[in-house]
Every structure is written in C-alpha cells, then in structure tokens.
Image (spheres, rainbow, N blue to C red):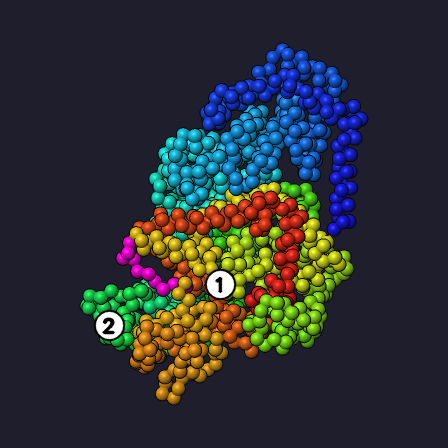
C-alpha cells in the first residue's frame, strides 16, 4: 500500500541519517581517499592480479588459487604504500578515528545494497576493500575482522549481482571471487570466511560435474579432471574448518556444511584419494556434530563402494560408542528393511553396539518389535493384506505378487500365537486360513507340475483365441485358487465387521513384554540430546486407546524416569520417514528464524514434535497437548450453535446438484453465492479464538501468535511444496494460539500434479483463516510476517537447498518422486529402461492402467479414479447376496465395462462361468468395504452422509499413500535393486533435479512463468502478493476436492 511504502521510505531515510550524520561530524568525505577514491589508480593495488590474468590462462590461475595456500595475489606492499597509509591516518585524525569511519562507511554501503542501489554499493566497496587492506597491513592492526568482512561481502555481492542461483559462474568471475574469499581466510576471517570459501569451491566442483553431462543433469560419478578434484579436496577441508569454528549463531549454516560434506563423500568418495582425505578430516570434527545428519548417514548405510564404506561405517561405530541411544530407534528401522544389503549393514553395526551396550540393544529390539505388534494387530495385518492381495490378483492379474504377500502371513500364523489377542485370532480364523493356505499350496504345486509360470500380470493365464473364445489354462489350479478366495472373502468380511469395535487395548493382551517392562535403559523417543542427556523409559501405561480414524492409530503413554508421562500416537500402516525429514527441515528453518533479530523478537518459529519411525510402515509421533484439529474445533462450535456442519456444501448442492459437472465460471458463481447465504459468514474460527480466551489481552496475544504462525508455515509450506492442507491436517494450540501442521506425505507439489482433483493453491488461506486474523486481515501482521519469513528463506537458500537435496536423494524416500507426474512418467521411463535392457522382465499392470483386470477374462475394468473403489454404501454383510448365495454385480461396474477385442469375447468374458462373475463381485465388495471402513468421517460429515460416492472417492484419495504408493514403491525397489539399478537411479535423479530447480526458482523469485522466461526475479513483496492472490482466488478454491473444505 502507499502508506506502507511511505513508512518504509521514512525508515530508509532515518537509517541513512543514523549512519551518515556521525561521518559528517567526523569530517569524512564520502568520495575522498580515506574511503579508497583515487587510491587504486595511484598505488596500482590490483596490478598483480590483472597482470597475471593477462599472461596466464585462467584455469591455471584458478588452480593456483585453490591449491597453493599462500597464493592470493595480494599487493606487494612497500615503502611507498606505508607512506600513503600514514597520510590517510593523519587525514582521518588518527588510527582510531580512521577505523571508526571505515566501520560506519561499511555499514552505509550495506544499507545502499539493501535499498537496491547495488551498482553504487559495489563500486564503493571495491575501493573500501583496497584502503582497509592497505591500512590494516601497513599500520599492523591486529584486528582483521573488518578487513576480512569487506573482502567476504565484496565476493558475495559479485556472485549475487552477476549470476542467478542455477547459472554457471564464469571463469573470470571465479578468479575474482576466489581471490577475495581466499584473502578472508588468510586473515582469520572466522567461520563465515571458511564457509564461503568451502561453498564456492563446492559449487565450482558441482558445476564442472554438471558440465560433463550433455543433458544438464548431475552425474553421480567420480571427478573427471584434476581441477575438479582440487576443488573437491579444498571444499572438504574447508567445510571441516568451518564446522569446527561454527557456533550456535551459525547452526543453520553448519548443518548446510555437514550436508555438503556428506555430498562430497557420497558423490566423490569412490576415489580412494578423496576418501582418505575425508577420513582424515572426519577425525577432527567433534563426534556430537554428526548427530544432526544421522538420518542421512544411516540412509546410505548399505552403500556398496568400499572406499565410501571405509569412511561411513567407522564413523557410525564411533558415534555408536559415544551416543548409543541416538542410534537405537533408527537402527531398529533398518533391521526390518526388505533390502538385504541395508538389513545386513544394520545388523553389522548393531553387533558392534552389542559389544558395549548389549542390554540397551536387546531392549531397543524388544520395544521396537512389540510396539509394531501393538500398532498393527493380526486382525489389521490380514485385513490390509487381503485387500492388497485382492488388488494384485483381481486388479492386476499378478498372482505371483499375491502369493508373495499372503504366504509370509500364513507362515507367521503357523508359528503360533505369542499374545492373547493372537490366540483369539487363531481361534476365530485359524482353521479357515489353514484351508486357504492349503489351497494356495495346491495351486503352486499344480502349476509347477504343469511346467507353467505363475502369472505376474502381463503373462496372465487367461486369454482369448482368434475366434474370441475364452481359453482357460490349468483349470484345476484355478479351481484351487477360487476355493482359497472363497475363504479369504469370508474372512475379510468378518474382519471388516470386527475392526470398528476396536476402541481400546490392554498391553497385557496384545504385548505382555511391554506390559512387564520396568526400569529400561532405553530412552523415551525424541528425548535424547546432543549433550548425552535423555529420559529413560520407566514403564508403559497398560491401557492403550484406539483412535477411531482411518488408520486406527493408538494413543500410548510411557512413564519416564523423571516421573512424567510421555504420550505418543502409535501409527501403523504409514511410513513416517518423510515426516521425520520434514521435522529436520523445520529445525533448520527455526535456526534461521532464531538468527534474525526481527523474527526472534516476534518469536517466529514452527512448532515441531517428535517423529520416530519404527519400520517402513509404523512409527511414533509425539502427542502435542492442548491441541485440536480445525475440523474438530469447527464441528464442536457449530454443534453448540446448532448450525449444520455441512451448511456450505448443502447450500452449494441446493443451488447446483450437479456441481462437479459445472464449468469453472459456473462453479465460481455457485461457490460465491453459497458462501454469502450461509450462517455466520465464516467467522467460526474468529469466534472460537475469542470464546477460548479468558480475557481480551490473552485473546489479542493468541490472535497475534495464530496469525504469525500461519504466515510462517504458509511460506515454508510453499517452498516445500506441501499439499493436502485440509482442516484435519491443521491443528490449533488452544493455549498459545499457534497453528500446527501434521501429515507431511504430500511434499514437492505432489498434490498439485495428481490426476484427480489437483490442488490449485500454494497454501491454505481460506475465509475462516483470514477472518480469524486481525482487523485488516491479510494486510496486517500476516503479510509482514510472510515477507520477513520469505526474505530469510531466500537469503538462506543455499542452506535450504542443501537440506532438500539430501532429502530428495535419500534412497529411503526418493521413490515418492514418481507421484510428481500425472502419468507416472518417471515410473514408465524406469520400466522402459529395464525392459529395454531385459525383455524377460514382465510388465505388471500398474496405476497407469487406471483400471482393474479380471484374471479369468483378461478384461480391463475401469471403476473410476481409483482401482476397485465402487461408491456403494455398506449395509449388512449379506445385503448384496441373492437367495442362492450368489452375489450380484453392481450396476456401476456393468456401466463402466469397456469393450474387448470382439463382442463374442465380451459376452464370454461376462457370462462364461459363474466363478468369473463371483470373482468380480468379490473384488468390488472387498475394495468397497475397505474404502467405507477407511472413509474419512470428516468427509462424511461435510457431505452429510448422503453422498456415498464422494465418501468413497475421498477415501480413495486419502488412502492413495497406502495402496497406490506401496505398489509404486515395490516396482521402483525391484528396479533399483535389480540388475538395472544404475539406469533406474539416473531416471530418478533426473526427476529429483527438476524438483530442486523448482525449489531454487521459488527461493530466487523466478517461480512464475513470466519471470522464469526472462530470468528477472520478483522481489519478496511481489512474490508474496502473487502467492496470496493465488491462495485466495475463488476460481482456484471452487475447483478443489470437497474434502479440502475450501468453503471454510
């Protein structure tokens, strides 16, 4: 606004006068020799470097600067220079007055730079560097801090002014900046000098690496030139120097140094010479420092390169000797890895820990395995297993995959029960499942006797002949399989009815070992600190609450050795490793916000919580007290006011019952009209904040913290590409008013690129959130906090990109990148690579088929946006059975059957046998029951419970991380771990590089198409303005999925 611009201009003028007035009182001439004007011309202070650049090839100059410690092309100061220095001191009125003038002038130049008078600032700083260097040397000033700071600032400004974040640094600019940064390191410039020197060499090494790839992709190989090797070695040594000098003030940058150091190890460590240098440097870094990058270290524990392993494994062993508690939970995850190499490497490390912490290791293994047992009961294991098996068998025709899934479950059942719950399961379902197991074994035996391969999808045993007749191979084996599925279907139906009654567990029934555990050495998850302090587990509270939500997480309580109770959410069926990395990123952002004076004053930070994965599908999440989801708060508020929870949606459907079929402009009209006609006008959250405050002062403080915390996460969430921000993923701290985000499964703009209901907004900023802010809404504290936060993020982009690169190239979670493509281009590309290399690898019907596959007919059946989810309501378990015990195929399934090669073939496929029809119905019922059981109550409450299709659709989207992603992960892992791992890894790296460049564009202000094309970045104010316009656009909000609750 004009008023804000006016106030900003006044502040700039005031700041300028604060710096210039003292200089005027000291009688300083801003264009005089004291500040370097006329000095370079008279003394030829840059003559040596300029002369060398004329005579010597630029690459050789760069190598000399990097290799030779004493080469910095400093002037050879003589008697003439000393005479000039004395004259400058006399002109300033003494050495002390000269130093004061230089410091004030240096601050004034920073002000010029920040107020976009960059050309003038750079010109003046060039001259100031010369005069400060001259007087410091000639007058033997011991304090080199100003001298070092000037050279560092000059180098940083040159890089910022001349290149964009993704551009290459030209060789002449490399020479200039390398010489300036090197001078700073030679003058004891402290942490910042070594950090900048290391980062520049690291960047040049990466640049040389990229230039070797014709596609512009990073190569993961070894250095190809001595020049590149020199930069890598200097970067490694300098990162270590910087890490050793780092203090709390620089904690965010130190973490960046650690991550870049690890990048050097993993990218260049295959060269034994570089690995030896890294080994030497590792010894000089305090062992505690490595705790900050422990997830990244353990993610590469299975790396095959002997030279890299020679660095990594001894480091982890040393870390385990000093901090065994820090490794217990992460290692227990790796011990359950399906990847043999990773599991064996973890076992080796755990054995080394046993030599000095045997009791601790045994406790960690016991607690981890028993918590998983509590998180996923046999009832749930079989429910999930049968649902997934039905998709593999009926949906993809992948019998082999189905067997790989079910046979281990049967083996586990044969081993017998260890708890009361497991005994009850065997008593109820044991005999039926034993029969099904026998049928599976008969199926395998019959196929083996016939010398045929078990179908894996594309080579299904069902096909058509030239006349369209259905061909059945090995009917006896298929009969055995049909008998097995008759049993599985009955078992699944019974389990599905029992699960909703699962509301409370006793540890004595489901985990006697945890129930008996007392006085453990193992620490409470998330309590371990760098100084070695932690809270031990005293015991587990025997009663466990099962929360009635989609995944049925458990609320479990641990009593600590300090007498306090620590509450956790024990989540099964969900991979929390990505959430753990996001918490690590939030820690980095908090360090950046803590370092800035203004954001620290306003207490800007992201509220974090402990995340401790226990396996690839289970983990603990710290329970944040006094918080509730926005959905729950609005629901409770509307209940007290007797307002229908779904009033907005109801009004939209009243105006336009076919809302989803409307054009965008029609949706906008309906959306706006519905919001105008609803009771309360979206003031629910505003009222909630007021009603939960005891007085107006408390309300004002909570409202301010609410606004600021929302603004911080809006900007950080945008950089991270965080999606799926519906009201159940945003929580409000009822005491402080802060907004807390949960569920970080959709990062890197996955939600914006999905097929069904792609998100159109960069973050959540709906009318309820805006009306709960101050009187001016977005234009008040929210906007100023967004701008300040984005400024800090952009200024610290190197640190953030280093963290996100480590995040993306992490082999434990990089498979999620396939979600970034609408059509799974990455997965197709990787499958293409593998198939080209080995035509014997079968192609499984994946999510790209967008349909089901009847294994008896080979007919692809499209049942909507998600395979197998048919929007029908679940009633009595026999509701869909006819009087003869046969099930009726739903009309929705008939309506969507596509045509097959011939009409005769279609008729045969649909009516050839009763078994075929029953199989289709089994599949549809299993998927529908599972969808309805997992259907989000939040969506049901919004739709009023009368839109079963939307409930099923919502469930299909919400459950995609479990079903769709699990299949993609299996396919990717099979490629990455097979003989085609290198090619597949390159395809994945290419995708990761695109993501990184997108993040870099966001942090540079070139994230909008018009700016990306011309390379002219937006300033922070304009960038925030564009983002808020996108987030509040009615056109964007009206197109979002109903469960996102854009009308709130």
In the structure shown, which secondary structural element does the residue marked by tag 2 occupy?
Answer: loop
The tag on residue 542 is none
**Along the line of sight, which residue is nearer the eye, 130 or 327?**
130
**Along the line of sight, which residue is nearer the eye, 541 or 219?**
219
Residue furthest top as drawn = 79
Q: Nearer the viewer, mark 1 or mark 2?
A: 1
The tag on residue 473 is 2
In the structure shown, which secondary structural element does the residue marked by tag 1 occupy?
Answer: loop
Taken as a whole, is the magenta stretch helix, strand or loop? loop
- Counting residues from the start of the chain, the first of labels 1 and 2 encountered is 2
* Residue marked by disc 1: 755
What x and y, as percent, mark residue 315? 42, 39
Q: Quadrant of the C terminus?
A: bottom right
Left or right for 87, reference 666: right
What x and y, as percent, mark residue 1035? 62, 63
| Residues packed near mark 2 inside 10 Å, few (<14), some (14 to 19) or many (20 plus) | some
Q: Is residue 1 visible?
A: yes
What x and y, as percent, mark residue 809? 45, 47
The residue depicted at 53 percent of the width and 44 percent of the height is 801
**Label 1 vs label 2: CA separation?**
37 Å
The residue depicted at 53 percent of the width and 49 percent of the height is 998
Q: Quadrant of residue 707?
A: bottom right
What x and y, as percent, mark residue 408? 33, 64
Left or right for 39, reference 957: right
Q: Is residue 275 magenta?
A: no
The residue stretch that appears in magenta: 838-847
Residue furthest right as drawn = 25
Vertical order, 849 against 117 (above or below) = below
Vertical order, 455 against 30 (above or below) = below
Q: Quadrant of residue 668?
A: bottom right
The residue depicted at 69 percent of the width and 50 percent of the height is 784
């Amino acid at each position: 606004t004009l008023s804000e611009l006016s106030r900003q201009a006044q502040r700039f003028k005031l700041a300028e006068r604060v710096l210039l007035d003292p200089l005027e009182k000291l009688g300083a001439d801003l264009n005089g020799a004291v500040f370097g004007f006329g000095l370079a011309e008279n003394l030829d202070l840059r003559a040596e470097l300029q002369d060398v650049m004329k005579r010597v090839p630029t690459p050789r100059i760069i190598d000399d600067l990097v290799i030779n410690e004493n080469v910095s092309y400093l002037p050879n100061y003589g008697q003439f220079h000393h005479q000039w220095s004395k004259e400058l001191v006399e002109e300033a009125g003494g050495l002390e007055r000269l130093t004061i003038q230089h410091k004030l002038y240096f601050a004034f130049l920073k002000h010029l730079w920040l107020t976009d008078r960059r050309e003038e600032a750079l010109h003046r700083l060039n001259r100031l560097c010369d005069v400060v260097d001259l007087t410091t040397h000639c007058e033997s000033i011991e304090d080199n801090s100003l001298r070092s700071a000037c050279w560092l600032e000059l180098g940083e400004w040159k890089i910022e002014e001349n290149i964009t974040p993704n551009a290459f640094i030209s060789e002449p600019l490399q020479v200039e900046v390398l010489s300036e940064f090197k001078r700073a390191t030679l003058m004891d410039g402290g942490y910042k000098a070594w950090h900048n020197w290391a980062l520049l060499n690291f960047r040049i090494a990466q640049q040389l690496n990229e230039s070797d790839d014709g596609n512009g992709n990073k190569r993961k190989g070894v250095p190809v030139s001595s020049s590149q090797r020199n930069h890598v070695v200097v970067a490694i040594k300098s990162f270590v120097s910087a890490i050793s000098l780092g203090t709390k003030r620089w904690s965010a940058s130190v973490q960046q140094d650690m991550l870049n150091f690890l990048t050097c190890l993993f990218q260049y460590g295959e060269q034994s010479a570089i690995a030896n240098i890294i080994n030497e440097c590792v010894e000089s870094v305090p062992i505690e420092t490595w705790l900050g990058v422990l997830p990244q270290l353990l993610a590469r524990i299975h790396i095959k390169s002997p030279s890299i392993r020679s660095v990594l494994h001894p480091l982890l062993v040393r870390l385990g000797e000093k901090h065994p508690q820090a490794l217990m939970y992460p290692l227990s995850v790796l011990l359950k890895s399906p990847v043999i190499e990773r599991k064996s490497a973890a076992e080796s490390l755990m054995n080394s820990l046993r030599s000095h912490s045997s009791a601790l290791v045994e406790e960690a293994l016991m607690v981890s395995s028993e918590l998983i047992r509590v998180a996923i009961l046999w009832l749930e294991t079989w429910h999930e297993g049968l649902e997934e098996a039905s998709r593999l068998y009926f949906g993809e025709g992948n019998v082999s995959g189905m067997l790989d899934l079910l046979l281990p479950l049967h083996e586990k059942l044969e081993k017998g029960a260890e708890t009361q719950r497991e005994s009850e399961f065997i008593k109820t379902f044991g005999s039926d499942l034993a029969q099904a197991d026998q049928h599976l074994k008969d199926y395998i035996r019959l196929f083996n006797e016939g010398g045929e391969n078990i179908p894996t999808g594309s080579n299904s045993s069902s096909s058509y002949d030239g006349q369209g007749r259905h061909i059945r191979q090995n009917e006896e084996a298929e009969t055995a399989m049909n008998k097995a599925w008759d049993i599985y279907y009955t078992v699944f139906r019974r389990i599905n009815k029992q699960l909703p009654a699962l509301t409370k567990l006793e540890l004595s029934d489901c985990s006697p070992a945890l129930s008996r555990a007392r006085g453990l050495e193992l620490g409470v998850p998330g309590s371990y600190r760098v100084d070695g302090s932690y809270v031990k587990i005293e015991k587990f509270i025997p009663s466990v609450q099962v929360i009635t939500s989609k995944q049925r997480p458990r609320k479990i309580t641990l009593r600590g050795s300090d007498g306090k109770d620590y509450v956790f959410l024990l989540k099964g069926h969900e991979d929390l490793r990505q959430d753990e990395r996001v918490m690590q990123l939030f820690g980095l952002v908090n360090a950046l916000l803590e370092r800035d004076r203004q954001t620290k004053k306003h207490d800007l930070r992201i509220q974090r919580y402990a995340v401790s994965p226990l396996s690839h599908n289970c983990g603990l999440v710290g329970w944040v007290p006094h918080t509730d989801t926005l959905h729950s708060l609005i629901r409770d508020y509307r209940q007290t006011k007797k307002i229908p929870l779904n009033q907005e949606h109801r009004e939209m459907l009243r105006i336009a019952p076919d809302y989803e079929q409307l054009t965008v402009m029609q949706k906008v009209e309906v959306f706006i009209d519905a919001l105008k006609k609803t009771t309360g006008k979206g003031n629910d959250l505003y009222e909630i904040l007021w009603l939960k405050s005891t007085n107006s002062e408390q309300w004002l403080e909570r409202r301010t913290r609410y606004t600021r915390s929302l603004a911080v996460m809006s900007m950080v969430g945008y950089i991270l590409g965080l999606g799926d921000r519906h009201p159940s993923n945003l929580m409000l701290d009822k005491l402080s008013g802060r907004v807390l985000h949960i569920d970080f499964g959709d990062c890197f703009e996955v939600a914006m690129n999905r097929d069904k209901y792609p998100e159109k907004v960069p973050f959540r900023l709906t009318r309820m959130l805006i009306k709960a802010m101050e009187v001016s809404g977005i234009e008040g504290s929210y906007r100023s906090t967004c701008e300040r936060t984005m400024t800090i993020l952009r200024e610290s982009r190197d640190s953030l990109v280093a963290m996100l690169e480590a995040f993306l190239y992490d082999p434990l979670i990089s498979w999620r990148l396939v979600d970034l493509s609408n059509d799974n281009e990455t997965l197709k590309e990787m499958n293409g690579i593998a198939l080209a290399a080995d035509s014997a690898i079968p192609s499984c019907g994946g999510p790209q088929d967008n349909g089901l596959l009847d294994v008896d007919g080979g007919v692809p059946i499209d049942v909507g946006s998600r395979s197998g989810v048919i929007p029908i309501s679940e009633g009595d378990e026999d509701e869909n059975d006819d009087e003869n015990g046969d099930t009726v195929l739903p009309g929705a399934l008939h309506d969507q059957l596509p045509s097959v090669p011939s009409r005769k073939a279609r008729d045969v496929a649909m009516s050839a046998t009763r078994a075929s029809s029953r199989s289709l119905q089994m599949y549809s019922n299993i998927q529908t029951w599972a969808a309805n059981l997992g259907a989000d109550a939040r969506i049901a409450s919004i739709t009023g419970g009368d839109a079963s299709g939307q409930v099923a659709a919502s469930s299909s989207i919400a459950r995609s991380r479990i079903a769709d992603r699990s299949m993609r992960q299996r396919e990717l892992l099979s490629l990455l771990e097979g003989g085609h791992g290198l090619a597949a890894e390159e395809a994945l790296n290419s995708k990761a590089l695109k993501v990184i460049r997108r993040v870099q564009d966001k942090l540079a202000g070139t994230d909008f198409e018009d700016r990306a094309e011309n390379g002219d970045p937006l300033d922070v104010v304009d960038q925030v303005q564009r983002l808020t316009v996108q987030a509040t656009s009615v056109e964007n909000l009206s197109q979002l999925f109903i469960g996102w609750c854009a009308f709130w």
